[in-house]
């Protein structure tokens, strides 16, 4: 899914990532929510929506990424997210809701402001 959050003059926008690969471009001050959701292949459970290959770009400062993981499911103790592109995000709020602990690894993450 590709989403362009807001055009100039409309102000900050909130967007929720999906279980698939997402490409999101915002124009500053946006909130990107990568919450737990869904059913995959008939299995109902809470899966993270910040997934491998996701791309989030904020063109101006002030963006916030809220991402939730549960390392208990589906891989029991780890969650590996690769090929991420995260540009211009000012605030990262990352949480792991697993009651058993575990490791979340994000690979390819960048956080810098891109000029317009």
Image (spheres, rainbow, N blue to C red):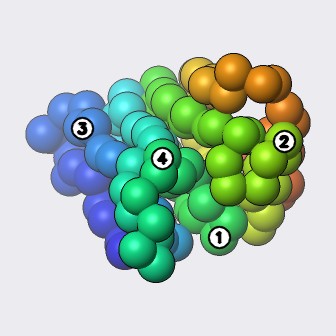
Query: Counting other residues with Cα less than 10 Å from the Cα at mark 4, is it few (<14), some (14-19), or many (20 or more)?
Result: some
For the N terminus, give its image quadrant. bottom left
When the figure is inspected, residue 10 is found, relative to residue 25, above or below; the finding is above
- Distance (Cα) linking label 1 and label 4: 19 Å
- Contact flag, marks 2 and 4 (Cβ < 8 Å): no
The mark found on residue 13 in the picture is 3
Task: Give yes or no for contact between labels 1 and 4 (Cβ–Cβ under 8 Å).
Answer: no
Residue denoted by label 1: 53
Compare marks 1 and 3 and give the one earlier in the sequence: 3
Left/right placement of residue 51 relative to residue 100 reads left
Most foreground residue, 47 or 19: 47
Residue at point 61% right, 25% down? 97
Which secondary structure, mark 1? loop
**Distance from the alpha carbon under mark 2 to that under mark 1:** 21 Å
Q: Nearer the viewer, mark 3 or mark 4?
A: 4
Instruction: Using the image as rendered, state which of residue 110 and residue 100 is in the foreground.
Output: 100
Image position, residue 43 (x, y; %): 46, 66
Q: Which mark is residue 77?
A: 2
Point out the frontmost of discs 2 and 1: 2
Task: Mark 3 or mark 2: name the one nearer the start of the chain.
Answer: 3
In terms of image quadrants, where is residue 51?
A: bottom right
The picture quadrant where one finds residue 42 is bottom left
Q: Secondary structure at mark 3?
A: loop
Query: Which badge, 3 or 4, is on the more N-terminal residue?
Result: 3
**Which residue is drawn at the image coordinates 77% and 55% (left, top)?**
75
Position of residue 53 relative to residue 67, above or below, is: below
Please name the residue that numbered disc 4 is placed on. 46
């Amino acid at each position: 899914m590709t989403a362009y959050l807001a055009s100039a003059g409309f102000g900050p926008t909130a967007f929720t990532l999906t279980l698939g690969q997402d490409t999101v471009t915002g124009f500053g001050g946006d909130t990107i929510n990568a919450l737990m959701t869904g059913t995959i292949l008939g299995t109902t459970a809470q899966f993270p929506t910040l997934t491998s290959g996701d791309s989030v770009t904020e063109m101006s400062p002030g963006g916030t990424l809220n991402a939730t993981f549960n390392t208990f499911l589906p891989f029991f103790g780890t969650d590996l997210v690769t090929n991420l592109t995260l540009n211009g995000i000012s605030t990262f709020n990352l949480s792991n809701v697993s009651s058993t602990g575990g490791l979340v690894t994000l690979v390819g993450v960048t956080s810098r402001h891109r000029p317009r």
